[in-house]
Amino acid sequence: MCACTPCMNTYRHECICACQGMHPLEDTAPRIVEHPTDVLVSKGEPATLSCKAEGRPPPVVEWYKDGERVETDREDPRSHRTLLPGGSLFFLRILHGRRGKPDEGVYVCVARNYLGEATSRNASLEVAVLRDDFRQPPGDVVVAAGEPAVLECVPPRGHPEPSVSWKKNGVRVSDRDERLTIRGGKLMVASTHKSDAGVYVCVATNVVGERDSEPAELVVFGAWGFNFWGVREVGAILVGLTAILQSAQHLARGPTTRWCWWRGRRSLPARRWEVLPDNTLRISRLQVEDEGTYTCVADNSVGRSEASGTLTVHGKGDPGEHPWVLVECPGKPLSLPTLLQCPPSLSPGPMTKLSPLARA
C-alpha cells in the first residue's frame, strides 16, 4: 500500500507524497469457504446447492454431478438450472420420473483461477418420493371385548421411508392410552373396549406429504359376540306329526356363525331330521324314540353359545286331550332360547307364554 507522509515545511506551496513500503496485492489460489450440503427435496420443487469460493483473481465456479459437468442456463437458456453470481447452483424445479432422474446425484463445486483449483466436499441431492398404493392396506378385525386386537398395514414405498400413524373415525389416534401401541405399521390394542370399535385408516407420512389407506373396521363384541332373546312356548306334539324346534336369536353384525343341532351328545342323522336355512330343526313323522334333549349350538371366531330343550312325544290320543310338551331353555344370559312350534294343521290347546330371556 502507498501512504503519504505529512508535509513538514508549511512555507512550501506543494507537498510531496512519499510512498513508504509499497507492496502490490498478491494473487492467491482459490479456496472453498462455503461447502454445499446434502439436500432432500420433493419432485417439482425448487432447490439450491450452496457454494462460495475466494481467490485472486476471483475464481470461476463450475458444478459437476457424478463426475459430469452440469449444464446451466449460461450454456442453454432452456435449462432449469442457474449458476448464481456467488457460485451456488439453483434448480427452478427438480426433475424426477420413471424415464429419468437428471437432478438426483452427488454434486461438487470446483473453483478455478490461473493459480489452481479447489474442489468442495460432496453433497447429495436426493428426491423425496411417496407412492400412492399401500403395499398392505389394513383389514377388518373382529374381536370380543377384553381380547387384544391388531390392525396392520405396510405403507407405500417412499424415500425417505414413511412413518405410520392411525386415524379412528377421522381423528388421529394417540398412543398415550397405555392399552395402545403403534409400532412398525401395527396398531395394537392390548385389551379392547367396545369404545375401540370404529373405522380406522392407516396414514403414511414423509416430507412429500401424507397418504391415507382404505378404511378398515374394528368390530368389538360383548362376551361371545351374540345378543339373544326369545319367548318359550308350549304346544302339543303327537306321534306321526312334525315337530319344529326353532332357535329365536338375534346375531349382531360380525363374523360368520356356524349353527348346529345335537341330540344328547350326538349329531343328528339325516333321515327324518332336517336343519332349515333359518337354522330351525324339523323332525318329520315323530316317533316316541325322538324324545330327548336337543341342543342348538352357535359358534364363530369370537365365541360359542348354546341352549337345550327337552322334547316329549306322546302316543296318539284324543285330539281334544293333547298332552302339553314343554321345551325348556336355561335362563342364563347369552343362552339361545329354543322355541317349539306346532304345525298349523294341529289346533293346540291353551298356549302358555313364559317371560323373554334377558338380553345380552
Image: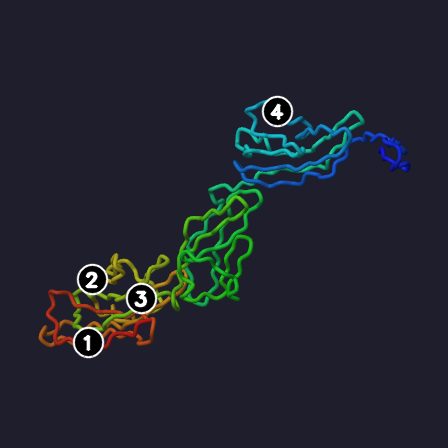
What separation in Å lies between label 4 and label 3 (alpha carbons)? 86 Å
Residue 274 tag number: none
Percent x, y of residue 68: 67, 26
Choose the circle earlier in sequence order: 4 or 3: 4
Q: In the picture provided, is 65 more to the left or to the right than 149? A: right
How was this image coloured?
rainbow
Residue 284 tag number: 2
Choose the circle earlier in sequence order: 2 or 1: 2
Say whether marks 1 and 3 touch (CB < 8 Å): no
Residue at image position (12%, 65%) is 344
Choose the circle earlier in sequence order: 2 or 4: 4
Foreground mark, 2 or 3, reads: 3
Percent x, y of residue 330: 31, 75
Foreground mark, 2 or 1, reads: 1
What separation in Å lies between label 2 and label 4 (alpha carbons)? 97 Å
User: For mark 3, what is the residue?
Assistant: 296
Q: Nearer the viewer, residue 352 or 357?
A: 357
Residue at image position (26%, 66%) is 248
What separation in Å lies between label 4 and label 1 (alpha carbons)? 97 Å
What's the residue type where badge 1 is placed?
A: Lys
Residue 154 vertical position relative to residue 10 in the rendered view, above or below: below
Percent x, y of residue 333: 33, 74
